[in-house]
Structures are given as structure tokens and as C-alpha cells.
Amino acid sequence: EIVMTQSPATLSVSPGDGATLSCRASQSVRSNLAWFQQKPGQAPRLLIYGASTRAAGIPATFSGSGSGTEFTLTISSLQSEDFAVYYCQQYNNWPRKITFGQGTRLEIK
Amino acid sequence: EVQLLESGGALEQPGGSLRLSCAASGFTFSKYAMSWVRQPPGKGLEWVSTISNSGAATYYADSVQGRITVSRDNSKNTLYLQMNSLRAEDTAVYYCVVSTVTYFDHWGQGTLVTVSS
């Protein structure tokens, strides 16, 4: 099983600042990596797939990068609605053995 | 607009069974693979199962293999998850997810399964 490790567990950032979230895979997943945002009481929402492609309707303030085992989600100029939990997910062996990271909580500083 | 509506979640005793349903609309259901993802209260996301568009192929996480069966009825635009031999660790919100443009791009709002005596 491919283990996904996200860091940090919690990130405190001031509104208007940027944030960088990291995700590491225990073995290469090529570019088969997605990022999801989840707000309290809501279902997750797809932000990024293919490591760097924004999903439909996702603003350009969200960007993804990386390949292999190291990935980054960058959010520029944080708005109040961006404070949430973010998960990375690998689907390198789709539809088998899909795994998620444990999440990064982005909170207001 | 893609809509996924889960139902069937309930309080069930350990060892019991439940069947979850997911009613789909707003897209051609028979064209796309469907998945279940679960989230224990206050914890992260866990992929549970995926079924191909035709239903001919199914895939399961090791944690549920042998106890859970995914199926679909393309004539009713409905996805199912039959859960047997329930354990406390199966307690979670269960999400129905469709993969259209890419994987896991639309999610339902979830249904809560609680396993407790």
C-alpha cells in the first residue's frame, strides 16, 4: 500500500497571506495525485488532479506541483473561505489501492 | 448538475448488516465508475470500494474485503453498498463518489453509519 504523508498537520496563516501544503508518497505515484478541500459538515471537493490541473470552477489562487513522491499545494492570498482541511490522494493504481493523506488543517492565525 | 444522494445509514449492532444506496442524477450513470469513500467521525478519508461502469469489475480496500459488496443498477441510476459483519471501526460517514472528467470529481453529502451495541 502506498502511504501518503501530509505536512504540517496544522498550518496557521493570516488572511491575505499564502500557504504551502506538502504531501509525500512512500513510493512514486508519477503525477497521479489529487488534492481535496473539506469544510466542516461538508463533503470533500476536488481541487487539483494530475498533480497540477485545476478542477472545474477552482480559482487560480490554487495551484499544485510535483511528481513522483513529492507534491505541493499552494494557495495564494488566503480568503476566509479557504480555511479548511486539505487532503492529498494518490490513484496511481486506479481503481485499486487508492489512498489518502491524513490531512492538513489550515486555520486562521 | 451532478447530484448524488446517499441513504441507508443507521445505528446497527456489531455483527449486523446494512445496505447503503446512492441515487444519481444529472449525468449518464451507466458511463462512469462509481466509488464509496468513508470518513470516521473527526478523522480522515478512506477509500472503500470502486465499481466499473458496467458493474463487471469491483475493487475493495483490504479493510473491508470479504465483508462489503458494491453493486449498481444502471436501469435505476443507483449505486449500492452491502455491508455485513459490521464492526465498530466501520462507523463513519459514507460518501458516494463519481469519476467523470477525472477521478473522484463529484461527491454526495454522505450517510452516517454507526456500529454500536
Image: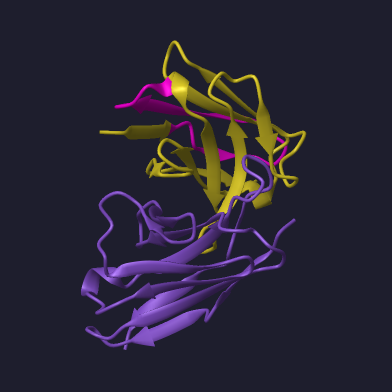
What residue is drawn where x is 27% and y is 86%?
A17
> Can see residue B61?
yes
Residue A97 magenta-drawn?
no
Position of residue B73 relative to residue B58, above or below, is above
Locate residue B58 relative to residue B24 in the image: left or right: right
Which of these two is toward me, B109 or B60? Answer: B60
Drawn colour of chain A? purple
Which of these two is toward me, A59 or B15? Answer: A59
Residue B18 magenta-drawn?
yes
Position of residue B22 relative to residue A84, above or below, is above
List x then y, in percent, for residue A88: 52, 62
Q: Where, quadrant-wise, is the N terminus of chain B in this rendering?
A: top left
Colour convention: by chain
List x then y, in percent, for residue A89: 55, 57
Locate residue A45 relative to residue B49 in the image: left or right: left
List x then y, in percent, for residue A1: 75, 56
Which portion, as a residue range, is magenta? B7-29
What residue is drawn where x is 39% and y is 51%?
A43
What residue is drawn where x is 54% and y is 26%?
B80
Which of these two is toward me, A92 or B17? Answer: A92
Position of residue B9 relative to residue B39, above or below, is above
Drawn colour of chain B? yellow
> Can see residue B116?
no
Which of these two is toward me, A60 or B93? Answer: A60
List x then y, in percent, for residue B20: 52, 30
What residue is drawn where x is 46% and y is 69%?
A65
